[in-house]
């Protein structure tokens, strides 16, 4: 089936609450997708973010981000007082520090006034949600210890001593209930949005990072799944090796998995993770799929990723288990980076579509696998991803030789038509899935770039303005015409 998609993170939606939410603008966006004939809404990971606000460094692989909870919806449902609503200017970026303070204050007021109204469904949600007890206690302890990493907590709590944990559950009862309340609200709003999107013929495509953050409920509750020493400190961490773009490689710092332990236990933690994702999404992009074939292992404490080594991973056994335990899960594999024969074989064995990016196509010769003429049906082709320049920003920085090669292959176009040319190329390609970031649909420059890998600060901030949103809606008919001609509207 030929589909088109648009990549837009929830937080990038417009609105008056300082950040994109699961509220009115999300539903209007679904309406736009349906009118335009777009079938897939791709989002970034939706978990609570930590340092740097990266959705790929979440405090939980299962939980939802409370910042995405829509307050006006709670007000409409009688769960929130109008006096607790707040307004932030419709910025073109998220002011996270101010936002977090205001939103937490508003949500705590909501909890104080409305918890008793929803106490029974919240408890029901807790009972049927296996990960929530550990996460809620972790989040409550983070509040108690001023957001410090669990690795700095008192020893008996770090090691989850049964008596200490029981005492914490009792002394932090109210905060634990608050954290469960937040996850209940998030889940309620997410399910409602997904149901609305599905009724409109729109599939939600999630994104699952291969690794979890060192400071997370996942590592604290289940350290046995990771390469930790007896003191519960990482021994090896994740990254990518040096390449043309970064001579030191990229040191991500995420703890690596204890694959021997996971295999012995039939990948139970991973099965739970994929099963949870299948409940939230219709499709799933797996970030850094390469790491399931082989991963770059760096000694913990290393200053950079240079002195790492490639280690084999049991991806084939894992995904056989996933196919058995979570049948029908539709997966796209992000296989960008150092793709060797082992990665290619795993991708072929799984049958997942890999990813190609048009921005990577025109800087070399005609054997480049990202070129339109070299694509195959079982692929997902993107104009760009959240880690790239916007297409307008990319075009502004490349040299004349690459521009000439682009025009030779795509046909001549004016500089200000580059986004339209790229969108047309991916939509008319043979690949079954073609995806564009919202920034490319709007023709925005690099001031709207979502993330610059390997940098700290200034990432994950971009939001659509009210004007951007209206401009987007005005493109629905033109986009529908293009998609219909390309055979992507059925």
Image (spheres, rainbow, N blue to C red):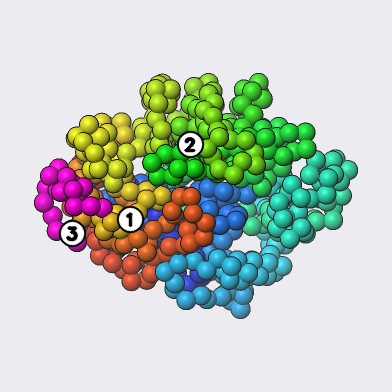
N-term-proximal mark, 3 vs 1: 1
Q: Position of residue 196 (x, y in %)?
A: 42, 53
Query: In the image, 147: left or right of 296?
Result: right
Q: Quadrant of residue 303?
A: top right
Q: Earlier in the sequence, mark 2 or mark 3?
A: 2
- Say which label, 2 or 1, has the lower sequence index: 2
As for residue 415 lying within the magenta part, the answer is yes
Measuring 29% from the left and 43% from the top, which residue is drawn there?
Answer: 360
Q: Which residue is mark 2?
A: 241
In the displayed structure, would residue 473 be above or below residue 306? below
Dot 3: element: helix
**Which residue is more in the foreground, 31 or 95?**
95
Numbered range of the magenta stretch: 398-416
Q: Measured along the vertical axis of the image, is residue 105 above or below residue 189? A: below
Main secondary structure of the magenta stretch: helix
- Circle 1 sits on which residue? 390
Q: How many marks?
A: 3
- Of residue 30 and residue 139, the one placed in the foreground of this image is 139
Question: Is residue 273 visible in this depiction of the protein?
Answer: no
Which of the numbered marks, if any, corresponds to residue 415?
A: 3
Tell me: residue 438, above or below residue 83: above
Vertical side of 294 occupied by 97: above or below: below
**Quarter occupied by the C terminus:** top left
Q: Are marks 3 and 1 in contact (CB under 8 Å)?
A: no
* Label 2 SS: loop
């Amino acid at each position: 089936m030929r589909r088109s998609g648009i990549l837009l993170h929830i937080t990038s939606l417009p609105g008056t609450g300082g950040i994109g939410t699961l509220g009115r603008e999300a539903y209007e966006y679904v309406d736009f997708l349906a009118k335009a004939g777009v079938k897939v809404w791709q989002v970034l990971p939706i978990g609570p973010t930590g340092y740097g606000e990266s959705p790929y460094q979440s405090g939980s692989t299962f939980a939802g981000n409370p910042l995405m909870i829509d307050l006006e919806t709670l007000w409409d449902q009688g769960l929130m007082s109008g006096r607790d609503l707040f307004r932030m200017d419709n910025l073109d970026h998220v002011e996270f520090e101010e936002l977090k303070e205001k939103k937490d204050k508003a949500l705590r007021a909501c909890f104080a006034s409305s918890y008793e109204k929803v106490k029974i469904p919240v408890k029901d949600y807790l009972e049927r949600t296996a990960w929530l007890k550990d996460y809620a206690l972790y989040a409550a302890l983070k509040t108690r210890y001023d957001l410090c990493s669990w690795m700095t907590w008192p020893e008996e709590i770090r090691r989850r001593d049964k008596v200490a944990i029981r005492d914490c559950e009792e002394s932090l009862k109210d905060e634990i209930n608050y954290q469960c309340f937040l996850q209940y609200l998030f889940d309620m709003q997410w399910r409602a949005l997904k149901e609305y999107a599905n009724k409109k013929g729109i599939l939600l495509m999630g994104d699952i990072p291969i690794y979890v953050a060192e400071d997370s409920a996942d590592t604290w509750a289940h350290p046995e799944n990771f390469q930790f020493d007896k003191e519960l400190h990482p021994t090896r961490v994740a990254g990518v090796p040096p390449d043309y773009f970064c001579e030191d490689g990229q040191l991500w710092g995420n703890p690596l998995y204890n694959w021997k332990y996971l295999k012995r236990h039939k990948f139970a933690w991973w099965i739970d993770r994929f099963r949870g994702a299948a409940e939230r999404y219709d499709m799933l992009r797996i970030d850094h799929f390469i790491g399931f074939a082989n991963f770059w292992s760096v000694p913990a404490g290393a200053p950079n990723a240079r002195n790492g080594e490639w280690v084999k991973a049991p991806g084939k056994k894992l995904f056989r288990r996933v196919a058995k335990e979570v049948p029908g899960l539709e997966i796209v594999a992000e296989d960008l980076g150092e793709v060797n024969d082992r990665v290619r074989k795993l991708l072929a064995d799984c049958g997942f579509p890999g990813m190609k990016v048009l921005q990577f196509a025109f800087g070399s010769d005609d054997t480049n696998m990202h070129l339109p003429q070299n694509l195959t049906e079982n692929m997902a082709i993107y104009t760009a991803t959240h880690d790239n320049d916007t297409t307008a920003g990319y075009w502004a920085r490349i040299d004349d030789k690459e521009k000439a090669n682009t025009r030779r292959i795509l046909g001549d176009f004016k500089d200000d038509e580059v986004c339209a040319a790229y969108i047309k190329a991916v939509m008319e390609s043979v690949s079954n899935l073609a995806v564009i970031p919202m920034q490319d649909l709007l023709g925005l420059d690099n001031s709207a770039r979502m993330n610059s890998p390997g940098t700290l600060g200034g990432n994950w901030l971009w939001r659509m303005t009210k004007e951007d949103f209206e401009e987007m809606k005005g493109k629905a008919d033109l986009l529908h015409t293009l998609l219909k001609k390309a055979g992507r509207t059925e």
